[in-house]
Image (cartoon, helix red, strand yellow):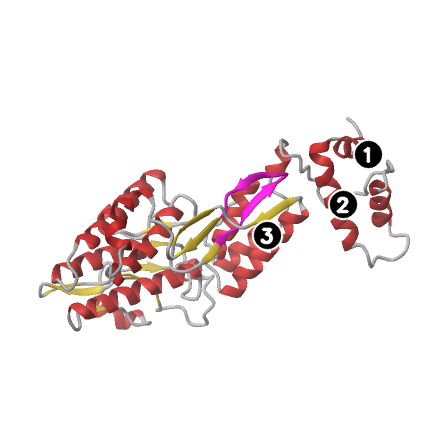
Amino acid sequence: MGSLDDALGVLLAEPATATLVRGLLAGMRAALEEAAPGNAAREAIDRILAGGGAALPAIGRPISTSPGSAAATRTPATPLWTEAAQAAGEHDPGPPPADRAQLWSALHLLGLRMAPDDRRDVQTRAADEARAAGATVEAPIVTIRGIDRDILIPRLSVGGRTLHDGLATDPDAPLPAELRVHAAAVDRAGADPATVAFTRLVVPVLHLLSQDRHLRHCLQSLHVRGLAERTTPTDQDRLRGQLTARTAALIAAVPGDPDRLECLVRLHEAVTSVVHLPPAADVSWWGRLRVRAHTTIRDAAAEIGPGLVKLPPARFDSAQAFTADNIPLRIPEVSGIRSPDVSGMVLACVRVWARVHDTDYPGRVIYAS
């Protein structure tokens, strides 16, 4: 087996890798600028950058940034995965993905479940680690419709090769293929505001179903009694079918018609039934999406008539009177929620109480038991 000295010589001699390796070494050299005179690491880097043959001392795990190498997409050793899972409150994170692009995506998806400051910290640390390993962090290639303009996952590249396209949201982005047939009705001037708002909720859920391995669901029409295990490809297809069908029904409904209230309730249920364990806090990206669903159905129902929907109060004992088939979570499963008194709290409303054609239909919540 050749020495590390020989390996560096090969990488520095190869045009495809020389620039990347020298850039990585230059970054290390800048970080050591304030080191004491005679620092062995700094002197070794100086010799290599000057063309000498001395090898670097062992500083962490060596990473090849050659676009064609297996190491270019291998997960760097990092504690960030564990810390991010804890910040998101993930009950069962599992091991970090073995592929760099998948890890990049998974870290940012965990960030969508965190408070804004925690999310920014994970984004910054993930980007710093990626750049230190020779990657480039750029604006996303893919943009989907969403509740606001946001970069959910930046683009990740190595040596000019894209490892992850990235993902951004924009309220005015086109509808996806599943809903494009309805674009004329939704995107026209004067389109119903609640319908437009719900498309900005549905589209991110449709997209993330296959991206976020920690997503679960509790949609009762799919014969789920409680909170289903992580969504399988079959679950994802069935959920997509429900989301697209219920969106189409709302688009076709007549504004102000009582029948439209049922469409609103069913679509709200489909959107909010896609959750994590534990459900993300309201201040997180997922929480804001859930809250936007609540305010959208509340305001739209008020235009049809007063008192037609009810959202549950914060305490489960107060919500029981107008909910049914509720989902309890044990305290250890909600330990990621930073509250001194989480027991008995409603963690997420996954169906509103509604009165449709003079018939009352119970709401449904997830609560801490």
Could you tell me if the residues under marks 2 and 1 are in contact, i.e. CB atoms within 8 Å?
A: no
Q: Residues within 10 Å of mark 3 (few under 14, many from 20)?
A: many
Please report the residue visible at 78 percent of the width from the left and 53 percent of the height from the top. Answer: 30
Measuring from the top left, give residue 196's x and y in whole percent. Answer: 29, 58
Give the quarter of the figure containing the N terminus. top right
Residue ID for mark 1 = 5
Cα–Cα gap, marks 2 and 3: 19 Å
Measuring from the top left, give residue 157's x and y in whole percent. Answer: 58, 42
Q: Which residues are magenta?
A: 152-166
Q: Residues within 10 Å of mark 2 (few under 14, many from 20)?
A: many
233 relative position to 99: left or right: left
Residue ID for mark 3 = 126
167 relative position to 362: left or right: right
86 relative position to 181: left or right: right
Of callouts 1 and 3, the N-terminal one: 1
170 relative to 308, above or below: above
Measuring from the top left, give residue 311's x and y in whole percent. Answer: 26, 68
Q: Which mark is residue 286?
A: none
The image quarter containing residue 361 is bottom left
Please report the residue visible at 30 percent of the width from the left and 43 percent of the height from the top. Answer: 178
Closer mark to the observer between disc 2 and disc 3: 2
Residue ID for mark 2 = 25
User: Residue 160 magenta-drawn?
Assistant: yes
Q: Secondary structure at mark 2?
A: helix
Q: Is residue 285 visible?
A: yes
Cα–Cα gap, marks 1 and 3: 29 Å
Residue kind at label 2, given as amino acid type:
Leu
Q: Secondary structure at mark 3?
A: helix
